[in-house]
Image (spheres, grey):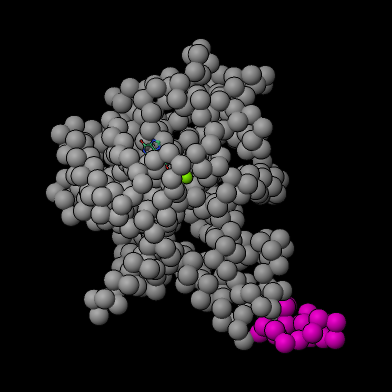
Amino acid sequence: MTTRYRVEYALKTHRRDQLIEWIKGLLAVPFVLHSQPTAIYHEESDRLAAVATATYRRYAEILRDVEVMINDHIEHQKSGRLGQSKLKLLVPTVGPFFTSLLLEDAFIFQDQRRHISRRRFVAPSFNDIRLILNTAQLMGLVRGSQIKLVTFDGDVTLYDDGCCLVEDNPVLPRLLRLLEQGKKVGIVTAAGYTEASKYYARLKGLLDAISAHKTLTAEQKSGLVVLGGESNFLFRYDQSSPDLLTYVRRSEWLLDEMRTWTEEDVTALLDIAEASLRECVSALSLPAAVLRKERAVGIYPLNGHKMHREQLEETVLIVQSILERSEVGNRLPFCAFNGGNDIFVDIGDKSWGVRACQHYFGEIDRSMTLHVGDQFLSAGANDFKARTACTTAWIASPGETVQLLDELLTLEEQWAPKQGL
Ligand code: IMP
Ligand code: MG
């Protein structure tokens, strides 16, 4: 049993999103019952069209039922009876929801683009459902509350892994549009530097574009902040600084709970993390060097080397479990994650980062905040933690972030006239 459990855990749990897997399983039933893989397109097109219509209707019905179940979960959440939520019983790892998810409408929207219900050989996939959930979340935000703050992860979300936000990145006009609309924008990245110049080097395209922008007001420009090291170093946009960013002292933005994090605990946690990273480097013969920083410790590959996915995952799971079992790891929040070709342990995590942005901008509500990121697996991923602080969208590439922001604008434009806005 133990072995089976460990295999299941090691191979699956941290690499699966249980809500998505569960929805995938529900949609697999009509797919299996209705799909006609042996039918020939030309000869039986009438029959195929009828099947596609039936499959479409079943998918939409299932997603409407899940939508109702999520609303019921939200009611239980509000009254502190989460244990009795049916969704929680079916998907024990499911977290809180801060708005409804309009899954049926989102399915209709995505089906027009991805033709999910017309497929006969490929069942609704992880990516189909991930994108339906993203659209459902945007619809829930646009029709429910109103988005006041959008936070973004950096690597893979705004730019390719390890790259910079350069001037021809198509996401730039979309970010400027958010600021123009009066929304606040936070870049909540694990990349942790204490100097503004380092962030200027990585975000130059965006900062220069804001600085040169003719119509953005000073107030709109000040709607941009960068929160580095996940929840450790806050910088605000500052037109007068040579780096266009100014460091904000911790006393000005820390949440009350974060004030209890002591320097002794920070050092103790990083010491344990560093020791376990060093052990992994040696035990797994990783071609990596250790980097200790003020609020983080990590390993990065030696010149010309790459670590395998398995080595990275093994290391992150080991370090995380050692920290979880330590005393200080129970007092002080931390995030151990696999950065694709490096591993870092940061003090705090993105839930604290997003909450700090909400606090800095005047207590913006969780139901009015959206975090966009690429790392939402439950272990070894850093955007996952943001789920407790706000609504989220899970993208797989910077191109998808652009699509998501365009989708948001389309939905806002469609919805506002109906409201007489
Ligand atoms: P993100 O995707 O924007 O959160 O950035 C994650 C990447 O930032 C990591 O994979 C590292 O390559 C890099 N990084 C640089 N400094 C730090 C740090 O202090 N903590 C964590 N990641 C860091
Ligand atoms: Mg990322």
The residue sitting at 48% across, 35% down in the picture is 187
Q: Residue at x 66, y 78 (%)?
A: 121
**Residue shown at 48% from the left, 14% from the top:** 241
Image coordinates of residue 369 in percent, x first then y, are 48, 43
Tell me if I can see residue 349 in this picture. no
In this view, the residue in front, 212 or 389, is 212
Q: Is residue 37 above or below residue 287?
A: below
Q: Which residues are magenta?
A: 34-53
* Camera-nearest residue between 384 and 222: 384
Please say whether residue 52 is visible from this viewpoint. Answer: yes
Residue 164, position as x, y percentages in the image = 54, 33
Q: Which image quadrant for residue 247?
A: top left
Total marks shown come to: 0
Left or right relative to 207: residue 36: right
Left or right for 67, reference 282:
right
Residue 38, magenta (yes or no): yes
Quarter occupied by residue 131: bottom right
Q: Residue at x 42, y 56 (%)?
A: 309
- Magenta stretch holds residue 399: no
| Quadrant that contains the C terminus | top right
- Based on the displayed image, in which of its 4 quarters is residue 129 positioned? bottom right
Residue situated furthest right in the rendering: 42
Quadrant position of the N terminus in the picture: bottom left
